[in-house]
Amino acid sequence: MWILLSILNVVFAYYAEKSYDVNKAQCKFFLFLIVVANVIILGLRDIGVGFDTNVYIELYFQEAKKISGFRDLFFTESEGDKGFLLLAWVSTLLGNDPRILMFITELFIISFVIIGIYKSKKLLNYNITWFVLLFVLCFQHDTINLMRQFCAMSILFYGYSFILQKRYGAYLICQGSALLFHTTSLVLLLVLLLHLSLNSSKEIQKIALLSIAVILLLFLFFYFKFVDFLHSTGLMQSLYFNRYGEDSNLLTDGAMGMAMPLLLGIQILIYIFAKKTQCILPNYLYMLLTLSMFTIVFQFASFYTIKNLYRLGYYFYLILIMYYASMFQSKKISITVLSYLFVMMTMYLQVKSIYNDYVNHNPGCTVYKSEILGIK
């Protein structure tokens, strides 16, 4: 089913891209089919397909049953994220089966992503097919495992179109909404800072880049103090503090260290290719460099602090693959160079996947099951 879903996503994306300039209604129809395919296949899976489903679905669903109305939702003393609790509460209104929450969650995630694709396509002029293919390779499996984070990521991906339009107030509303689903979504404020310097002089851009690099280094060196600060100010719940704080059972053992140079090398090579071929605009190249730097820093942090910190890089990588999709469609790139780029991207994703499986005690690719669809 995973292969079938991947094929459907890419095929529908191909026809959406093909019809984008000639028939907007047809383009929207094919994008809608991507939503339908994902909601049916991912939304109707069994509990247990995706390790977060065993942890959060039943917990949030039962917690939501205690809420008598919308006003009670944000005043409950629950340790859970209020945004995901809202989805759980809506699910309880529709029935008594926790799988409804998985259906609602998948609908929520994929809808924001697809709307975000349509909005940002007009602003970045990237290839929808390439984006969806990279999304499938990067994130399709993670969407069923990291549901609350992907709720936050999908909102911010949609909100990124507001940054591109310089509608920063609208983006901050999306940022606040994402925060209700996952505290880690705060990291994407760094992208807002990047864009504020994007149309400035090269000197200002260098200062902005240096400032962000310093912030990231301070984050790495004072990570646990930063976590303590977030917890003490109430921005981080005790649930996350216990998981990501100094006493966490997710402290890294420093293994898989050889993967780091390979990941860094592949990202650098992709950047060099982009710069030498001039296949994307200078501002895009600036974003390509900085977003790559963010993903590498958080991957690096997961080797030396808390294993799961690589997930913070996902926020930036979801934005980054839009710039890759823009780069890959350039007529300045030959088929040979494009092949090299795609091989490097695939290598990067495979190494990252192997490491992430190691972090999660090698869960492997989850076997698809759906009682509703009769697949066991």
Image (cartoon, grey):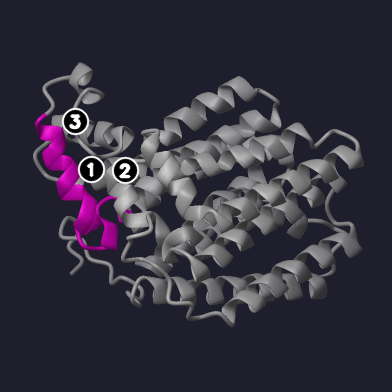
Q: Callout 3: few (<14), some (14-19), or many (20+) C-alpha neighbours within 10 Å? A: few
Regarding residue 110, the answer to whether it shows in the image is: no
Which is nearer the N-term, disc 3 or disc 1? 3
Query: Relative to the observer, which residue lies in front, 371 or 78?
Result: 78
In the image, residue 6 above or below residue 72: below
For disc 3, the marked residue is: 77
Q: Give how far apart the Cα atoms at labels 2 and 1 are.
A: 6 Å
- Picture coordinates of residue 110, whole percent (x, y): 43, 44
Give the residue displayed 83% in from the left and 66% down from the top.
272
Q: Which residue is mark 2?
A: 105
Q: Quadrant of the C terminus?
A: bottom left
Does residue 319 sit above or below 262 in this rendering? Answer: above
Residue beneath label 1, please?
Answer: 101
Task: Name the residue: 35% across, 71% down.
Answer: 360
Q: Which residues are magenta?
A: 41-66
The answer, for residue 60, to whether it is visible in the render is: yes
Label placed on residue 109? none
Q: Can you give x and y, in whole percent of width and height, for residue 104 in the image?
A: 28, 40
Q: Position of residue 64 (x, y in %)?
A: 16, 34
